[in-house]
Amino acid sequence: MSTNQDTPAARRIDTGEGGVAEIYEIYPGASSVVPVQPQRRTGPPAAQAGMATAEYAIATLAAVGFAGVLVFIMRSDEVRGFLLNLIRTALTLP
């Protein structure tokens, strides 16, 4: 990494203890600013405490039902014959 010493706002800060480290502050005064503390998160209200779990359960039941319908359709003779014919056509050499 290179320090951009040509920037007019860059300011050199000496450590004062033998000059071991050289730090170039690009934004002078930025190190003295107190960082903003994130606000404390609060949980959901008591009436909605289990809503996420219930929503996941409903979505899981809907997915299982849809998978059951797909299995029923895929086991029918018409679909099975269509898929086998498609595979045989794709594997035959021209």
Image (cartoon, rainbow, N blue to C red):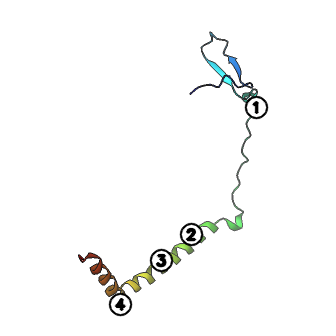
* First reached walking from the N terminus: tag 3 or tag 1: 1
| Depicted 56 relative to depicted 89: above or below | above
Pinpoint residue 38: horizontal percent, then vertical percent.
71, 45
Three-letter residue code for mark 2: Tyr
The numbered disc on residue 33 is 1
Label 4: few (<14), some or many (≥20) within 10 Å? few
Q: Residue at x 66, y 15 (%)?
A: 15
Label 3: few (<14), some or many (≥20) within 10 Å? few
Pinpoint residue 9: horizontal percent, then vertical percent.
74, 26
The numbered disc on residue 50 is none
Q: Residue at x 67, y 12 (%)?
A: 16
The numbered disc on residue 78 is 4
The residue lying toward the viewer, choosing from 38 and 89, is: 89
The numbered disc on residue 64 is 3
The quadrant of the image that shows the N terminus is top right
Three-letter residue code for mark 4: Glu
How far is the residue under mark 3 from the one under mark 1?
54 Å
| Depicted 64 relative to depicted 80: above or below | above
Three-letter residue code for mark 1: Val
Number of marks: 4
User: Do the residues under discs 3 and 4 have CB atoms within 8 angstroms?
Assistant: no
Three-letter residue code for mark 3: Val
Mark in the foreground, 3 or 4: 4
Mark in the foreground, 1 or 2: 1
Q: Is residue 75 left or right of residue 14?
A: left
The residue lying toward the viewer, choosing from 41 and 9, is: 9
| Depicted 30 relative to depicted 72: above or below | above
How far is the residue under mark 3 from the one under mark 2?
12 Å
The residue lying toward the viewer, choosing from 30 and 87, is: 87
* First reached walking from the N terminus: tag 4 or tag 2: 2
Question: SS at mark 1?
Answer: loop
